[in-house]
C-alpha cells in the first residue's frame, strides 16, 4: 500500500488533516516534525539554533528515508521539506504527494508570532507572503494532487479519501 504525504505552507492544517484522515481510514499517522523532535531530543527552534536550518533539513531527509519503510501511512510533512527535490523523489517512490492549498491569510493567522516555528517567527508579514508565493509554485509542481483547504475539515477529508482509493 502507498503512503499518503501531505505538503503545504505552515499553518495549512497538514497535521490536523493527517490525524483525522488516518483515523477515518484506520491507517498509521506520522508527522515529520514530531519525529525529528523526538529523535533530536530538542524542539525545532533549538535544532535551528544548534545545527542551523541545514541541520534541520538533513534531519528531514533522514526522517523521510526512515518512513519509506512504512506502507499505507498518512504522513504530514514540514512546510519546507518539499523545497528539496531529493525529498520529493523519496516521497514519489513511496506513495502520493498531496498539496493542501490554504489561503495565505488563514496560514498567517495561525502562525504569526509562533516561536516554535523559526521560519515564521523571524519574518514580517510581507516576508512571509513572499515565502508563501515562492513555496506555492514548488508545492504545485511537486504534488500529484492539490486540495483547496479552508477551515472545514470534512470536504478535505472526503477528497483525500477519494484520492487514496
Ligand atoms: C518549516 C515548517 C515547520 C517546520 C519547521 C520549518 C518551514 O513545519 O518543519 O519549523 O520552513 O516551513 P509546519 O509546516 O508543520 O509548521
Image (cartoon, rainbow, N blue to C red):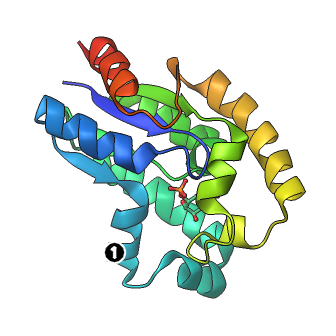
Q: Is the residue marked by circle 1 packed among few (<14), some (14-19), or many (20+) residues within 10 Å?
A: few
Taking 47 as reference, is 71 above or below it?
above
Q: Secondary structure at mark 1?
A: helix
Q: Residue at x 60, y 26 (%)?
A: 142
Label 1 sits on residue: 39
- Whole-percent x and y of residue 22? 21, 38
Residue 131 in percent (x, y) is at 79, 49
Percent of width and height locating residue 93? 39, 28
Which residue is at 59% across, 52% downward? 10
Split into quadrants, the picture shows ligand 1 in the one at bottom right
Tell me, yes or no, if residue 111 can be seen here: yes
> Which image quadrant is residue 146 in?
top right
Kindly identify the residue that appears in the image at 80 percent across and 39 percent down: 134
Residue at 75% in and 44% down: 132
Quarter of the image holding residue 117?
Answer: bottom right
Q: How many marks?
A: 1
Seen in the image, is 53 located left or right of residue 22?
Answer: right
Q: Which quadrant holds the C terminus?
A: top left
Q: Residue furthest left?
A: 26
- Residue sitting nearer the eye, 113 or 2: 113
Q: Nearer the viewer, residue 68 or 81?
A: 81
Is residue 90 visible in the rendered structure shown here? no
Between 116 and 75, the one lying in front of the other is 116
Query: In the image, residue 36 lies at what x, y percent?
Result: 40, 68
The residue positioned farthest toward the front in the image shown: 152
* Nearer to me, 17 or 7: 17
- Left or right: 116, with 162 as reference point: right
Location of the N terminus by quadrant is: top left
Instruction: Classify residue 101 by image quadrant.
Output: top right
| 1, above or below 152, in the image | above
Amino acid at each position: 500500500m502507498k503512503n499518503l504525504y501531505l505538503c503545504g505552507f505552515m499553518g495549512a492544517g497538514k497535521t490536523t488533516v493527517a490525524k483525522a484522515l488516518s483515523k477515518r481510514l484506520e491507517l498509521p499517522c506520522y508527522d515529520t516534525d514530531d519525529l525529528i523532535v523526538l529523535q533530536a531530543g530538542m524542539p525545532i527552534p533549538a535544532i535551528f539554533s544548534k545545527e542551523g536550518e541545514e541541520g534541520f533539513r538533513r534531519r528531514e531527509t533522514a526522517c523521510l528515508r526512515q518512513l519509506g519503510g512504512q506502507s499505507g501511512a498518512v504522513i504530514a510533512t514540514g512546510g519546507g521539506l518539499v523545497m528539496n527535490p531529493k525529498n520529493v523523489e523519496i516521497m514519489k517512490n513511496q506513495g502520493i504527494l498531496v498539496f493542501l492549498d490554504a489561503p495565505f491569510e488563514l496560514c498567517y493567522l495561525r502562525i504569526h508570532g509562533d516561536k516554535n516555528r523559526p521560519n515564521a517567527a523571524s519574518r514580517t508579514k510581507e516576508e512571509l507572503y513572499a515565502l508563501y508565493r515562492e513555496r506555492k509554485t514548488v508545492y504545485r509542481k511537486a504534488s500529484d494532487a492539490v486540495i483547496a483547504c479552508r477551515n472545514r475539515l470534512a470536504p478535505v477529508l472526503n477528497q483525500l479519501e477519494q484520492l487514496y482509493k
